[in-house]
Image: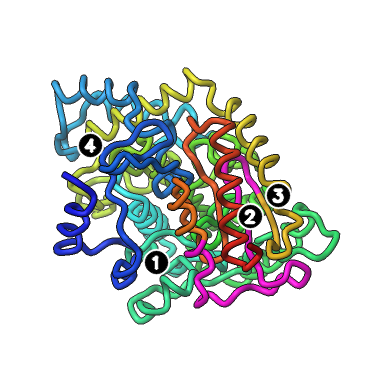
Amino acid sequence: MNNDDIIRRDLAVLWHPCTQMKDHETLPLIPIARGEGAWLTDFKGRRYLDAISSWWVNLFGHANPHINRRLREQLDSLEHVILAGFTHEPVVRLSEKLVEITPPGLERCFYADNGSSAVEVALKMSFHYWRNRGQRRKTRFITLASSYHGETLGALSVGDVPLYRETYEPLLLRPLIAPSPDCFHRAAGEDWHDYSIRQFAAMEALLERHHQETCAVIVEPLVQCAGGMRMHHPVYLEKLRAACDRYGVHLIADEIAVGFGRTGTMFACEQAQISPDFLCLSKGLTGGYLPLSVVLTTNEVYDAFYDDYGKLNAFLHSHSYTGNALACTAALATLELFEQRDAINANRALAGRMRAATAHLADHPHVAEVRQQGMILAIEMARDRSTREPYDWRERRGLRVYRHALSRGALLRPLGNVVYFMPPYVVTPEEIDFLAEVATEGIDIATGES
């Protein structure tokens, strides 16, 4: 088996995600034969450092021995069973552990099988809660500009990335959209804290005007990832939690991308010392091994559905692979690694190395900003650093960085003009230095500085 054979067979039968397939006439696919730690290896033995955790899912490296061992053990007893009317030990243990480690008050776990599905669950559950409580006017949601919550129709409805949304507009719900607290747009001399407070005024006004028709506000705490790694201060979440309580509106925290240590704490909400009404988790939940998502919610929400069957108040949402035993086992093994490695503390040193390795880019003539939240670091390219004039998206400057990185043995997949690092937690300081070197070279090439 070789690279060329896999590519030929692939292009004959596959349609790849988030891809204009015509690009592969000039941009070869990269067939991967195996993974180890932070590295991926093709059939020729060429290695690529996985700087984006294979779409933000991998936490402790590819082919992790501990997770592998736990999955082999589980395979010998149970792979899957229907979770309606049945249960199993891995899903019970995982639920107990998630209730223990997530913010206070989240006492119930409802499983799905991917991030978009978790968002669908939270949206439906919030709407249905108000219906069960007799508040049928509550049918709308509030979201943030530049937000992304997935690509099923409900999740897409509460997102605001034009590239994803515009084509399907006729099919979507129409949420209320508040300005993003994205601190990239703060005034000269203004800090993240003050700008985030200033931006909250528009959200407060929306809640005041529309709370009687609003089920929930949905946000990506601290980092709006797919929207370009836009970042804000935790004070925004503090004020949002208080306002949702004041106006009788649910708060949905979509931590699908930012949960499990990505922002420097186990969950981003911890930095604001708040608990949402719904917490959506996926991606890193299984360490990058298997599809699994979960929505944690309160007993108050759970109790609104607990009734005689004839009342028709039950939440009858389902997925075939809900609470899959293998996926739950991978998740439990991943949580064990957090404890064994003291990962949150270890990541602080790695995040510091990322900051130091890229500090020089703050003075690059075509870098508007270098920003960071924990293990997520973003470098925003611009036509002019002083004016922050963006490059036209059609120039595909990020693609030039991607191509260069592949030639140097790194997987960097920019979001438009934003180059970012979100590596597995097993990355070494030396590998971080390598990524910074490759990114710098790529940015120079993409912006005509070399």
- Which stretch did the figure color magenta? 372-400
Question: Any mark on residue 324, and which?
Answer: 4
Q: Amino acid at mark 3?
A: Val
Q: Amino acid at mark 2?
A: Met
Q: Earlier in the sequence, mark 2 or mark 1?
A: 1
- Residue 418: where, in percent of width, then height? 57, 60
- Residue 91: where, in percent of width, then height? 28, 30
- The span from disc 3 to disc 4 (Cα, nearest Å) is 37 Å
Provide the secondary structure element on which disc 4 rests: loop
| Residues at discs 3 and 1 in contact (Cβ within 8 Å) | no
- The span from disc 2 to disc 3 (Cα, nearest Å) is 12 Å
- The span from disc 2 to disc 1 (Cα, nearest Å) is 21 Å
Question: Any mark on residue 156, and which?
Answer: 1
What residue would you read off at disc 2?
Answer: 231
Provide the secondary structure element on which disc 2 rests: strand
- Residue 401: where, in percent of width, then height? 52, 59
Question: Any mark on residue 344, and which?
Answer: none
Q: Earlier in the sequence, mark 3 or mark 4?
A: 3
Apparent side of residue 372 relative to residue 173 in the rendered image (left or right) = right
Residue 126 highlighted magenta (yes or no): no
- The span from disc 1 to disc 4 (Cα, nearest Å) is 25 Å
Provide the secondary structure element on which disc 1 rests: helix
